[in-house]
Amino acid sequence: MFADRRWFARRPLTERLARYHPGFSGRPPRPQVVSITSFVDVAAPLARALGESAARVVGITEELELRLQRLHLSIDATTFRLRQLGWSVVGFGCGAALGLATGAPAPLAGLFLVAGPTLGFLLLEQRLATASDAWRKRLMLELPVVSEQLAMLLSAGYSLGGALRRVGSRGHGAVATDISRVCRRISQGVAEHDALREWAAVAGVDGLNRVVAVLALSNEGSDLGRLLSEEARAIRNDVQRQVIETIDRRAQQVWIPVTIAALVPGVIFLAVPFVGALRIYATNA
């Protein structure tokens, strides 16, 4: 097992015999004891284990590979965790430098040492989570329009694969990008329904699950155009309901600073005569 690692592997036979060759002009280069490849091989499992544990601690339960695949990122989970480890090391260095520069006491310096790596890790994790939520929201908003486009194409006589290819090649949004990946999966030999189910599993959008369930009925000769139009109408109603809930929630949040701004002067105006009355009673006593 250790023979494949640079730290433990012996020098190749060609390098050991090179000194006996007539054309040998110097000492062959010795292999590096520490290299980037060997460091990555050692640090990758540690970074991945620590990253997954830290993500669960902060409440992120969705798989990292799923979010990276959803955003069409070319890096894998191990590379992302290594990047987080690097940012954590940088945060640790910044925390140590800040503690030394400010001459902070030991508890505060320890807080800097803990907060630096934590912020370095959470920075990339939060950016990925925000991008993933934004992509899902774009899918939800674009899905009714794309569903109606698929409905028109299927009603016009297009096959399911032909309709998907046309939407994927003509569109430029989030749904069109995902459909292009579905078409690539179909060209690689994956069945149409399996590729669509993979898309629904990666996207994590409820409305898309219903649309994929309707598209799975293409082999049964159903009126997919009408069914997709109904699903598009239902998705629009869901989006409208979510928008109304967001507006109501923000309207309630507006009253929080207004209430605080109204209560503070009121408390001051009530406190002044109350303190004056207490002084009068104290003087009479």
Image (spheres, grey):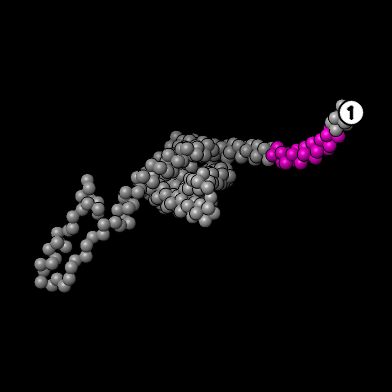
Which image quadrant is residue 273 in?
Answer: top right
Judged from this view, the residue extending furthest toward the top is 285
Q: Residue at x 53, y 53 (%)?
A: 103
Residue 265 in percent (x, y) is at 80, 40
Residue 110 in percent (x, y) is at 49, 45
Callout 1: SS: helix
Residue 278 in percent (x, y) is at 84, 31
Left or right, residue 143 beside residue 93? right
Residue 98 on the magenta span? no
Q: Residue at x 20, y 53 (%)?
A: 9
Q: Residues within 10 Å of mark 1 (few under 14, many from 20)?
A: few
The magenta span reads 251-277
Residue 268 on the magenta span? yes
Location of the C terminus (image quadrant):
top right
Left or right, residue 76 beside residue 258? left
Q: Is there any visible trace of residue 156 in the rendered image? A: no
Type of the residue with mark 1: Asn
218 in relation to 170, above or below: above
Of 251 and 8, nearer the camera is: 8
Q: Residue at x 52, y 36 (%)?
A: 206
Q: Residue at x 54, y 38 (%)?
A: 207
Residue 143 in percent (x, y) is at 55, 44
Left or right, residue 254 beside residue 232? right
Left or right, residue 28 beside residue 259? left
Q: Which residue is mark 1?
A: 284
